[in-house]
Amino acid sequence: MAEINLAPSGADKVSSSGKKYNLLALIVSSVLISLTIIGFIFFFYKKYQIKTAFDQSKAKEQSLKNEIAYLDPKNAARFKKKIGELSSLLENHIYWSEIFSVIERSTIPTVWYDGLSVASDNYAIDLNGTAKNLDGAARQLVSLKKEKEFQNVVLKTIGSSDSGGNVKFSVSLQFDEKLIKKNKKTSAADSSIKIK
């Protein structure tokens, strides 16, 4: 059987310049496709950067709006009220540490306390303590009476607590209001903050 070939003779042979042209076309197409892909990646990256910057600027804008609203003169009445409440708290603050200092100063070495009750509304203290002996309890009562900050020092109860000779006692006393309240008149009007 005879071979039939419909292609022109020599068509199966590509010239070397044709091979170079095909290779060049392949390289150019690859470079164009790569540049297109890189362009898309760059575009989406820049779009992401712009969106992030936009979101940050929106957040900053909202923060500035909140700050402006905070400083708005309409809020001045609210701030003035808060400063007044704070001033009231400072003026009426109770300094319990001052009472403890006076009690500590007046306590003799042979006495210890195991109970303390304070009523700030009538400025009264009830102390429960133990002395090594009856003489110690009596000296403690005298020591409390000598304190100028305490008034109406009264021995409520006294009695033996155990076979070791210890004496339990209970004392009530009143104290000066100035001892726990140091009203320094630091009001909003006196402070450096002025609200019109």
Image (spheres, rainbow, N blue to C red):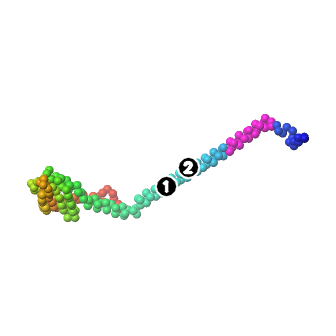
Q: Disc number at residue 49?
A: 2
Q: Residue at 86% of width from left, 42% of height from top? A: 7
Q: Quadrant of the C terminus?
A: bottom left
Farthest right residue in view: 1
Q: Residues within 10 Å of mark 2 (few under 14, many from 20)?
A: few
Number of marks = 2
Q: Residue at 26% of width from left, 61% of height from top? A: 92
Between 113 and 70, the one nearer to me in the picture: 113
Q: Disc number at residue 59?
A: 1
Residue 36 lies left or right of residue 86; in this view the side is right
Q: Residues within 10 Å of mark 1 (few under 14, many from 20)?
A: few
Q: Residue at 48% of width from left, 54% of height from top? A: 60
Question: What amino acid does circle 2 point to?
Answer: Gln
Q: Quadrant location of residue 20?
A: top right
Image position, residue 81 (x, y; %): 34, 63
Asked whether residue 35 is drawn in magenta, I would say no
CA distance separating discs 1 and 2: 15 Å
Farthest left residue in view: 135
Image position, residue 22 (x, y; %): 75, 39
Q: Is residue 149 shown to the viewer in this render?
A: no
Residue bounds of the magenta highlight? 14-33
Q: Earlier in the sequence, mark 1 or mark 2?
A: 2
